[in-house]
């Protein structure tokens, strides 16, 4: 029954023949509905309705509609998530709001496993404010001990992009709240990969992207979450016209929109937002716990096969599946070249410096036959040193 269910979801994706795609943790595969929806918006909405489509096709409501659909996957109540902008822009908005709520505390606590853009944004915010704010970066295992009453904001990515290591969201959020620390989670590698319970954990702010496990397409709009009882206290630093209480009144002064809509900024990117909206159709009827169980089973099978037949690779992800996201990483000194050789043979993963080979397991379209094929191909490439060719060592701009 479970196998039949995931065969049905796999059929909803447009997957290239002969390719095993294990990079959904970086860019999700394309749902067939996304293509159909974008073509409809091009031909019918934009093509026929022109500017009328803001009303007739509901373009103006897309950020809230898509936000609520994402919210259902991350344990957020309706009206607490809005889609739009990029993860970095949303992080900037959320971090400034969090620091304002945390005043007079000035320390942003994060960890060395965080995605670099999050740290870059935090550094920029500290410079912009110019009031002595500090970004403090510790080892992931030291985060809990580093929490104290001097910290203003705890800013973490739930799943480490390199290794798949997963933080304990509930434990760290509870400890932060007990100390009066505002909490901000990045769910880029969580949303759509496994169950998330923002409301149940009492999270203050969260952000995430739409193009990984949510399958919204390259550069798909991101999302931002604000705890419902905090929304009226948030004064947006990026106070754009779409975040105004009455955008089409064209008032000269800014009045924030009610609730999370005040975090909207500019005109929504309708075509990419529509693709994301359609992509979320694949989650209809999906039990996120069952999805997580399937992910663990696929990942465990892959680890078992690689460790049994390819001792040259060292597991970089946590051994315990309870502490992994929906990806597995291995370390290999020639990891970049080996990944290029793997891709050339139709098994697509990716590489992260200095030596990490990453493999994402998106159960909506990945099955056990894919795992077997990927493992067998990787074992052959490493065992026969098929990676040792100039074309596989040449670095691409995107790794």
Image (tube, helix red, strand yellow):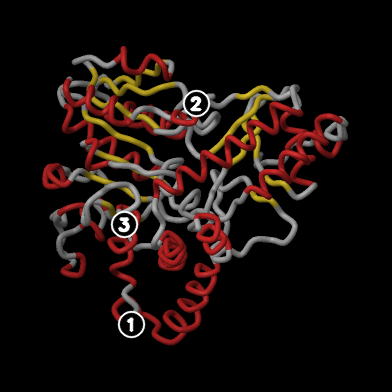
Q: Is residue 65 above or below residue 323?
A: below
> Which residue is tagged 2?
320
Mark 3 neighbour class, 10 Å CA radius: few under 14, some 14 to 19, many 20 or more = many
Q: Is residue 172 left or right of residue 398?
A: left
Where is residue 5? Give x, y as percent.
50, 60
Where is residue 189? Give x, y as percent.
46, 40
Q: Is residue 218 left or right of residue 139?
A: right
The secondary structure type at the circle numbered 2 is loop
Where is residue 349? Give x, y as percent.
66, 42
Determine contact: label 3, label 2, CB under 8 Å.
no
> Which residue is tagged 3?
67
At a point 69% along the width and 46% down the height, the residue shown is 348
| Disc on the earlier residue, 3 or 1 | 1
> Which residue is tagged 1?
52
| Disc on the earlier residue, 2 or 1 | 1
**Quadrant into which the C terminus falls:** top right
7 or 247: nearer the viewer: 7
Mark 1 neighbour class, 10 Å CA radius: few under 14, some 14 to 19, many 20 or more = few
The secondary structure type at the circle numbered 1 is helix
Cα distance, mark 3 to mark 2? 32 Å
Question: Which is closer to the viewer, label 3 or label 1?
Answer: 3
Cα distance, mark 2 to mark 1? 53 Å
Q: Residue furthest bottom?
A: 48
Mark 2 neighbour class, 10 Å CA radius: few under 14, some 14 to 19, many 20 or more = few
At a point 42% along the width and 20% down the height, the residue shown is 140
Q: Of the numbered discs in the image, which one, if any, rests on residue 35?
A: none
Question: Which is closer to the viewer, label 2 or label 1?
Answer: 2
């Amino acid at each position: 029954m479970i196998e039949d269910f995931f065969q049905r979801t796999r059929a909803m994706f447009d997957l290239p023949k002969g390719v095993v795609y294990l990079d959904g943790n970086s860019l999700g595969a394309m749902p067939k509905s996304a293509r159909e929806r974008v073509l409809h918006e091009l031909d019918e909405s934009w093509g026929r309705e022109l500017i009328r489509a803001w009303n007739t096709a509901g373009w103006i409501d897309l950020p809230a509609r898509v936000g609520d659909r994402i919210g259902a996957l991350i344990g957020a109540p309706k009206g607490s998530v809005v889609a739009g902008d990029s993860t970095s822009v949303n992080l900037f908005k959320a971090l400034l709001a969090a620091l304002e709520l945390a005043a007079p505390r000035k320390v942003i606590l994060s960890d060395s496993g965080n995605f670099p853009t999050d740290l870059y944004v935090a550094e920029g915010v500290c410079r912009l404010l110019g009031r002595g704010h500090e970004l403090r970066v510790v080892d992931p295992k030291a985060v809990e001990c580093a929490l104290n009453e001097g910290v203003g904001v705890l800013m973490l990515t739930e799943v480490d992009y390199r290794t798949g290591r997963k933080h304990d969201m509930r434990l760290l959020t509870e400890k932060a709240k007990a100390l009066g620390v505002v909490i901000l989670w990045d769910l880029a590698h969580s949303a759509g990969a496994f169950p998330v319970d923002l409301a149940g954990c009492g999270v203050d702010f969260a952000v995430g992207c739409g193009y990984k496990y949510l399958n919204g397409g390259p550069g798909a709009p991101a999302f931002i979450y604000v705890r419902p009882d905090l929304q009226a206290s948030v004064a947006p630093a990026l106070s754009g016209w779409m975040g105004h209480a009455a955008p089409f009144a064209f008032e000269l002064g800014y009045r924030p929109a009610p609730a999370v809509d005040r975090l909207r900024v500019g005109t929504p990117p309708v075509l990419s937002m529509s693709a994301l909206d359609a992509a979320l159709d694949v989650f209809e009827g999906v039990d996120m716990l069952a999805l997580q169980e399937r992910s663990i089973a696929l990942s465990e099978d892959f680890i078992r096969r690689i460790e049994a037949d390819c001792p040259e690779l060292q597991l970089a992800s946590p051994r315990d599946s309870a502490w992994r996201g929906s990806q597995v990483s291995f370390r290999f000194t020639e990891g970049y070249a080996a990944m290029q050789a793997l891709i050339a043979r139709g098994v697509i993963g990716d590489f992260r410096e200095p030596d990490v080979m990453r493999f994402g397991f998106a159960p909506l379209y990945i099955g056990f036959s894919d795992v077997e094929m990927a493992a067998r191909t990787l074992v052959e490439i490493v065992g026969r040193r098929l990676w040792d060719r100039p074309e596989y060592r040449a670095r691409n701009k995107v790794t």
